[in-house]
Image (cartoon, rainbow, N blue to C red):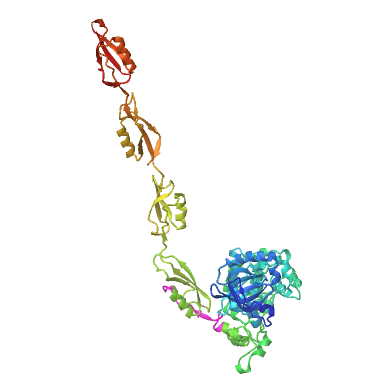
Amino acid sequence: MTSSVASNVSESSLRLVGRLLDGRYRVLSHLADGGMATVYLALDERLDREVAVKVMHDNLARDTTFVSRFRREARSAARLGHPNVVAVFDQGEDNSAGDGLIFLAMEYVPGRTLRDVLTAEGPLTPRAALDLFDPILSAIAAAHDAGLIHRDVKPENVILREDGVVKVADFGLARAVTAATTTNASGTLLGTVAYLAPEQVERGIADARSDVYAAGLVLYEMLTGRKAFDGNSPIHVAYQHVHGSVPRPSQTIRTIPEELDQLVALATARDPDHRPADAGDYLDEVRRSRALMTTTELDLRPGLAQHDMAAAVPTQLGDDVAPTSVVPIVSRTSPDRAPVPTEPGSSDDASDHGRRIWPVVVAVLLVLALAGGGAFWWFTAGPGATTRVPSVDTLTVAAAQAELQRADLRAAVTEAYDETVPAGTVMSANPGGGTEVRKLSSVDLTVSKGPERYAAPGLVGTSADAADATLQAQHLVLGERKEEFNDTVAAGTVVAQDPAAGTSLKPGAAVAVTVSKGRQPIAVADFTGKSAEQAKKAFTDAGLTVKEGNQVNSDTVAAGSVVSQNPESGTLFKGDTVTIVVSKGPVLVAVPATVGKQREEAARLLKAAGFQVAYDNVLGGLFNIVRASDPAGGTMARKGATVTLTIV
């Protein structure tokens, strides 16, 4: 951002030159003073680039409400990215000298403000005014689309860069200034009040339609060279906004086409509901109206009445030139507009009309010459001159930009995917090749990005529930979903994908996934009473670990078979343990020797050893003596077993 350098620079304005703000911005020189701030040229030592630093006046820096709003609005403005908006880079505070400076770092735009241009050149032609007005509205429309209101649209906030690019500055910053802080500088307030919408004056509210109102007043001023409402005090000017109507530009410059009268009236309606909803809608109306105007209407230089033109034409142009004629504008003439005076005795026939064309040409050239070098540059080499768009289709974007640059045009590049055109190649240009356009205007290039492809994201190890959203973010879709048990990956986690991560895919392509169901459960079979070896093999084959406890005697389970297991049933997972207890068989006891003993003694011995006793009497067991024992004495037998004694 920049402005005209003030002729009288105060010592206070120069006090910051050489200072390093916030450890980053080295102040190089003073640029301008305003009602809110002083603007300096500074070097961003971190990024090695020149920036404009706007340092708020001390009274604002001490206003806590202002500081809070300033920071908030600066953040909002920094989000705006548009070629016609002065970019906001940073906002900060510096207290290195104990003065608590509040500043804004923004794009440095070397050039002149629209106020400087109007002061130097006066009213502009309709074409020149609309050439400037289009990018102004484009910048404001971008802010409106982002939900940001400018609140201080005026010529002082419009900058014409040295290469002809139009920039709008100070988006949203007006909101940071409270009513209390605006009243301390009547000049600043008066300048701002000249563009305030009625609702801002009456109710202190502003929306996108308020910016449209101010923009309409800026258009009025570009066409007429004067403010729509002026006065000696802010109150006088504000009263006119609320109770008056903006005059038609043609009341001041009679050559202004009716379409421009209507555009100003549309934007400056006192009732906001009767204005376009935002700058974008107004820009559409401006472009439609421009298309209805003729080349003569657009290029006719304003400001000279009939007698003025007669006095201004040099005698060396020749006595055959009638310097007092002006071509009347007969199309779409407002009924309230006085006709442009014509030469006495002129007729409407084609030959007389032709004779009246020459004074117009002479008058336009004369006015351009009188306006000075700035206007001459504007219409011969600057944005007012014309050029033809070169054919750039099928060129690389770099080559196309070079061709446009040679034709004094700028390129606005938009990329689009294409299955056949190589990446980096221009597919189309708008306006197309051969079209005559204004110099320094933009040509929209559509450049191929090549085939639209997206890399398959890495899904393995991520949640299956998030896979669909992840793929959609890459313009892909979720394909077949399979599930399988996995002993190492938690349930619900992707364990495999097809195609693999990084594969280049067309938009909408499907990626299949395999999802873990977690550890596979293993049913536990009951091997009680069965062979221990059989149990061990079955459990091991199932992936379980077998642990064998101490063997025990069992009167019911054969030796080598499972007496018990833990767990007996249910489910386990691979690697879990099953404990089995193996039988040693029953407890064995030696059978006492009883042959030759009396029945009673033999029975006592056997029972004491834990055996049951049965008798087999021979000859009636007359002698009551044990003849034989089954099992025989000394034999190992199961405790509790029955020993049969043969008695004779």
Is 489 situated left or right of 358 in this image? left
65 or 601, which lies in front? 601
Q: Looking at the image, is 118 positioned above or below residue 633? A: below
41 or 344, which lies in front? 41
Is 641 situated left or right of 389 in this image? left
* Quarter of the rendering containing residue 172: bottom right
The x, y position of residue 504, in whole percent, is 39, 60
601 or 183, which lies in front? 601
* Quarter of the rendering containing residue 605: top left
Q: Is residue 531 visible?
A: yes
The x, y position of residue 501, in whole percent, is 39, 57
Residue 380 in the magenta stretch? The answer is yes
The x, y position of residue 70, in whole percent, is 65, 66
The quadrant of the image that shows the N terminus is bottom right
The quadrant of the image that shows the C terminus is top left
Looking at the image, how many numbered discs can be counted on the residues?
Answer: 0
* Quarter of the rendering containing residue 349: bottom right
The x, y position of residue 67, in whole percent, is 67, 66
Residue 57 in the magenta stretch? The answer is no
Q: Is residue 256 visible?
A: no
363 or 433, which lies in front? 433
Looking at the rendering, the stretch of residues picked out in magenta corresponds to 379-396
What residue do we see at 72% from left, 67% from top? 179
| Secondary structure mainly formed by the magenta segment | loop
